[in-house]
Amino acid sequence: MKRSLFQHIIRLFPAETTHAIRMALLRFVGYLPLGKWALRKSLAPSDTSLEREVMGIHFRNPIGIAAGFDSNGDYLTELGAAGFGFVEIGSVTPRPQPGTPRPRLRRLRKQQSLINNSGAPNRGLEQAMRNIRRRNRHTYDLVIGCNIGKLTTSPRSRIVKEYLRVFRNMYQYVDFFVINLACNTSAKQYVPRTREEILSLVEPMFEFRRGQLDYRPILVKVSPDMSKEELDMVVDILIETPLDGIEAVAGSTALNNGERGAVCGAMLTERAIEVVRYVAERSEHNYPIIGCGGMMTEEDVRRMFEAGASLIALNSGIRENGLKLLRRAAKVATKK
């Protein structure tokens, strides 16, 4: 993908600084009198054929933002005005956590990838709820998902309670949930890989949902480092329980050459597509899949849709190649 002069200049900064600059500029444009109109005209897909009904939810288009891009929901208005179909905030934890010390996001320039050792920094459940309550005309038709993760310092004995606390408090504010089964961006990783561990997380959520008037879909986000047998187990849970879908994939710790953190970006592309294809075929294309991980270009997005993804969530591709990837990806979705 060709980059503008601005993209070349901004990539001279460290990866986390680059993201902060980009988001500050997005916020600045949004504050201008015609800023949100400009975002919509320059970035937002306008083809109504992009509309999708997935998990019983209406999406204005199938291209969204993955968790980790707008962790607290600070930029929902601007991302909504820019035309994204959905934004997955998080990972959201019960209490704020600062993450690991900087630098914690390292760019691998030749590989078009990042090593994420951030430890899921976010300002916690209360801040996320405050931000979502501020929905306005630019976000009324923006689908919002919540990715739930664990506090790095919490022992395993508290994890189920932490996930359930976020789920119950966010239930009335978001449209769907993603249960993160790959909290792997810190020294204390949490990647449940047994049926018992995964069911212990999701079954209390199913129970809570049964008593609610509104239905919120629940998905699990899987690691690309899972074996075929482990993926089979997750798909079996999908088929046998009220789970609604799968998001694939998170970052990979198998590709980090011994460094701390998870690899995201182009190094992950092939594996992400492979996992989505396998999950889609194993589940006979009967369940929604959010494809993410390594979606750097419109060609990556096209291949992910062909593999069986229902929706695409972008992160590293925008960090490295800019927000215009949205419109390029939408053109591919139009041809789907």
Image (cartoon, rainbow, N blue to C red):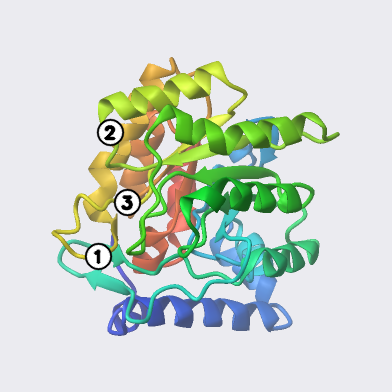
What percent of the width, then of the height, locates residue 254?
Answer: 20, 49
Q: Which mark is residue 274?
A: 2
Q: Earlier in the sequence, mark 3 or mark 1?
A: 1
> Which amino acid type is marked by label 1?
Arg
Q: Is residue 313 above or below residue 286?
A: below
Q: CA distance from mark 2 to mark 1?
A: 24 Å
Q: In this rendering, does residue 74 appear at all?
A: yes
- Residue 1 image-quadrant placement: bottom left
Quadrant of the image for the C terminus?
top left
Residue under the image location 29 percent in, 24 percent down: 229
- Residue 136 image-quadrant placement: bottom right
Residue under the image location 51 percent in, 24 percent down: 238
> Which amino acid type is marked by label 3?
Gly
Q: Nearer the viewer, residue 123 or 298?
A: 123
What percent of the width, then of the height, locates residue 310?
Answer: 50, 33
- Dot 1 crowding, Cα within 10 Å, few <14, some 14–19, many 20+: some
Q: Which mark is residue 294?
A: 3
- Dot 2 crowding, Cα within 10 Å, few <14, some 14–19, many 20+: some
Q: Nearer the viewer, residue 318 or 235?
A: 235
Q: Which residue is mark 1?
A: 260
| Callout 2: SS | helix
| Callout 3: SS | loop
Q: Which mark is residue 90?
A: none
Residue under the image location 23 percent in, 62 percent down: 112
Q: For the residues carrying marks 3 and 1, which lies nearer the camera in this image? A: 1
Residue under the image location 19 percent in, 65 percent down: 259
What percent of the width, then of the height, locates residue 79?
Answer: 61, 64
> Which amino acid type is marked by label 2?
Glu
